[in-house]
């Protein structure tokens, strides 16, 4: 199984999510934006050493073995899903939507305990899993086009297209929001990504019909690989019609909103001492406490 978004995209998503946060959380986490960005890919790196890490990054939602989920509604809880399908089956075909909830709960706990290393660890991992949930090929058994003779499509979509065209994308996010139901939100994000799978595959076929396979040999890090040439990529990217850009931006918006929501759910703790111990003299800390006295109200659950 390929990684998710290429490493630079994961790093960019965590960095941009930090920058998009509302104050005061933004100010605190910006103290560690380099760390949050640099470690955005740790979860992928763990796949080879940590048992059961890999299935946390995907959900093969269309696998026949997961038809057992169909009768459980749109956002089944893990316990009910495990009853219906067997826990081993879930770990075989992926647990990504539940993993987002698990990482979220860990982040709430970390904020609540004012535990700086845990906040950073769970925030960066949550950012990774949420980003993966926005990659359509992380929601299908045909994750690399291997079932339809389109092998290699995974890295074209998530690494090659962002590398070639990401510089021109509008990825500024300003609508960070409190998320009432993280469990449902995660399932909706995956469901939306899954609706994009047919276009991801059909446009590959169209680009190949029009431009041939478009393969060129390229050397990367001393290894010669076959890559799609730029003309082919331009045709495919045009066929994607902004999909990579909008999924990328949605991932940033999602990560930032979940970090913000976790802090709200933890009771909006003052993290001045946790993140800026030397930069906050006693009088400023007092002022901040006064200012935070008027805290953002947690919106009522509808
Ligand atoms: Zn991943």
Image: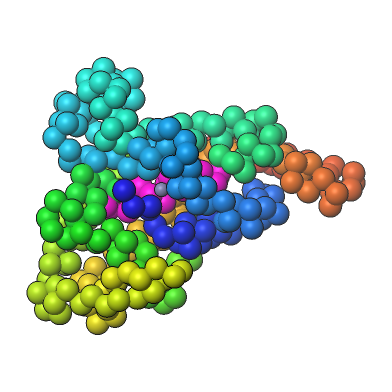
Q: Which residues are magenta?
A: 123-137
Is residue 128 found inside the magenta-colored segment of the image? yes
The colour scheme of the drawn protein is rainbow
Q: Tell whether 235 sits left or right of 252.
A: left
Q: Tell whether 84 sits left or right of 205.
A: right
**Could you say which is closer to the camera, residue 218 or residue 177?**
218
Rendering coords of residue 122 (x, y %): 56, 39
| Image quarter hosting the C terminus | top left
Provide the major secondary structure of the magenta segment: helix
Asked if residue 211 is positioned above or below residue 245 in the image, the reply reads: below
Name the residue located 25 percent from the left edge and 61 percent from the top edge. Answer: 152
Residue 219: in sight, yes or no? yes
Is residue 61 found inside the magenta-colored segment of the image? no
Rendering coords of residue 178 (x, y %): 49, 43
Residue sitting farthest toward the bottom: 231
Name the residue located 72 percent from the left edge and 41 percent from the top edge. Answer: 271
Name the residue located 22 percent from the left edge and 46 percent from the top edge. Answer: 140
Residue sitting farthest toward the top: 83
Asked if residue 99 is positioned above or below residue 83 in the image, the reply reads: below
Name the residue located 39 percent from the left edge and 74 percent from the top edge. Answer: 219
Rendering coords of residue 70 (x, y %): 16, 30
Q: How many marks?
A: 0
Rendering coords of residue 233 (x, y %): 26, 75
**Could you say which is closer to the camera, residue 15 or residue 174?**
15
Residue 170: in sight, yes or no? no
């Amino acid at each position: 199984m390929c990684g998710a978004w290429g490493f630079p995209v994961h790093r960019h998503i965590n960095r941009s999510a930090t920058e998009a946060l509302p104050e005061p959380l933004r100010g605190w986490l910006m103290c560690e934006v380099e760390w949050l960005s640099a470690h955005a890919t740790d979860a992928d790196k763990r796949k080879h050493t940590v048992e059961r890490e890999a299935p946390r990054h995907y959900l093969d939602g269309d696998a026949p073995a997961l038809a057992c989920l169909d009768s459980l509604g749109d956002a089944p809880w893990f316990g009910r899903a495990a009853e219906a399908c067997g826990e081993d089956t879930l770990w075989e075909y992926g647990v990504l939507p539940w993993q987002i909830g698990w990482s979220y709960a860990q982040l709430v706990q970390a904020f609540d305990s004012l535990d700086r290393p845990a906040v950073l660890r769970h925030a960066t991992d949550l950012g990774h899993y949420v980003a993966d949930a926005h990659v359509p090929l992380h929601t299908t058994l045909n994750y690399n086009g291997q079932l339809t003779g389109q092998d290699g499509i995974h890295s074209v979509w998530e690494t090659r297209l962002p590398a070639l065209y990401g510089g021109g994308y509008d990825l500024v996010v300003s609508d960070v929001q409190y998320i009432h139901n993280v469990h449902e939100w995660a399932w909706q994000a995956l469901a939306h990504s899954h609706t994009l799978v047919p276009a991801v595959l059909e446009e590959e076929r169209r680009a190949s019909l029009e431009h041939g396979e478009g393969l060129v040999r390229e050397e990367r890090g001393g290894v010669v690989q076959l890559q799609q040439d730029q003309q082919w990529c331009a045709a495919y990217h045009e066929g994607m019609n902004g999909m990579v850009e909008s999924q990328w931006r949605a991932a940033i918006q999602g990560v930032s909103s979940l970090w913000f929501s976790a802090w709200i759910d933890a009771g909006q703790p003052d993290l001045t001492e946790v993140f800026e111990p030397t930069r906050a003299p006693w009088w400023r800390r007092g002022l901040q406490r006064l200012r935070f006295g008027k805290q953002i109200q947690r919106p009522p659950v509808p």
